[in-house]
Amino acid sequence: MTDLRIGIAGITGRLGSLCAEEAGTALSGGTSRHPVPEKNITSSPDELAKRSDVIIDVSNAATIAEHAKCFSQNNCAWVIGTTGLDNAAQDAIKEASTRIPVLQAANFSPALTVFLDLARQISAALPSYDAEIVETHHRQKLDAPSGTALAIGEAVAQGRGLSLKDVARTDQNGRRPDNAIGFASLRGGQVIGAHDLLLLAADEEITLSHRALDRRVFARGALHAARWLATKKPGLYSMADTLKNE
Ligand SMILES: NC(=O)C1=CN([C@@H]2O[C@H](COP(=O)(O)OP(=O)(O)OC[C@H]3O[C@@H](n4cnc5c(N)ncnc54)[C@H](OP(=O)(O)O)[C@@H]3O)[C@@H](O)[C@H]2O)C=CC1
Ligand SMILES: O=C(O)C1=N[C@H](C(=O)O)C[C@H](O)C1
């Protein structure tokens, strides 16, 4: 599709501004609480949806319910990178995906997408090893654990046939339950995104590590996702779906 119109919700943000640059001439504008009409930046998601085929959403968890309603009504595909979502936001996304194509990814990096698959496999193969997930991000980050850390936790739980909500451990007080999946979050400086999955036994340890070195890796991934999603039927898709040979 050559004339695809791509909007960015959260266009003034750290990631949103890079997505806008990567979109180039396909950019149809964006949303901000501080509109700039001459740059097609509006405070109305409805207005953005009316001039977009697909919207990359890297704004704030508080906007999800309104975006779900608005993008569904305008038949606009929705790529969601925003993290820190509660159950109500997740339900709104699920409902929207019955009407429009939706791709949700806590991390747009191709290598991290592969990491999730490896995490599932390695955790299934070593079910008795203690799984601990450590993430580090810049001092401005609002949510913890990061969306990516939670996605890694989901992959570990899936590999082990467990439900993450039953075994997630964010408070290290007390004896560690055998099947716990632990999370530790560090915040400081301008770390773009660091994630480690440690599998620990008494006699050996193995670690999967990912470091984002440039925030543009997320912006490029988001643009790849948007172009891929624009031709899809309604449904809920992941970054892994975009890497499959079709
Ligand atoms: N999936 C992925 O690969 C990645 C996802 N992310 C996620 O993307 C989101 C944005 O990250 P980042 O760009 O670093 O964040 P920023 O805070 O830099 O940008 C978010 C933008 O959202 C806008 N916004 C709209 N509504 C609100 C609100 N109610 N409260 C605060 N801001 C609001 C703000 O713009 P304005 O003030 O102009 O309204 C702000 O600039 C986060 O959830 C983050 O975790 C980040 C990196 C990678
Ligand atoms: O807020 C960020 O910066 C990031 N957020 C995502 C997350 O919560 O996992 C992805 C990336 O790690 C950067």
Image (cartoon, rainbow, N blue to C red):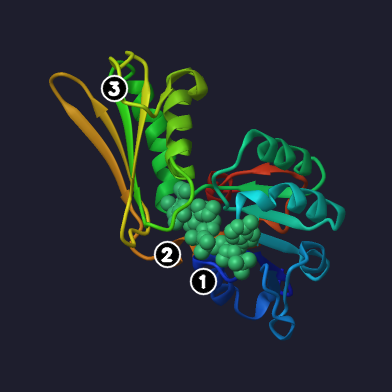
> Upstream in the sequence, badge 2 or badge 3?
3
Q: Position of residue 161 (x, y in %)?
A: 48, 17
Marking on residue 18: 1
Q: Position of residue 103 (x, y in %)?
A: 64, 49
Three-letter residue code for mark 2: Arg
Image check: 10 left or right of 182? right
**Between residues 74 and 14, which one lies in front from this camera angle?**
14
Residue most extreme to the bottom? 38
Q: Are marks 2 and 3 in contact (CB under 8 Å)?
A: no
Above or below, 113 against 165 in this view is below
Q: Amino acid at mark 1?
A: Leu
- Give the label on residue 130, or none: 3
Residue ID for mark 2: 215
Residue in view at x 75 percent, y 43 percent: 97
Residue drawn at (49%, 43%), measured in percent from left and top?
147
Q: Which quarter of the figure is the N terminus placed in? A: bottom right
Res 159 quadrant in image: top left
Which is nearer the N-term, disc 3 or disc 1? 1
Mark 3 lies on a secondary structure that is: strand
Residue type at numbered disc 3:
Asp
Relative placement, left or right, of 193 versus 109 is left
Q: Is residue 71 visible?
A: yes
Label 2: how many residues lie within 10 Å, few (<14), some (14-19) or many (20+)?
some
Dot 2 beta carbon under 8 Å from ligand 1: yes
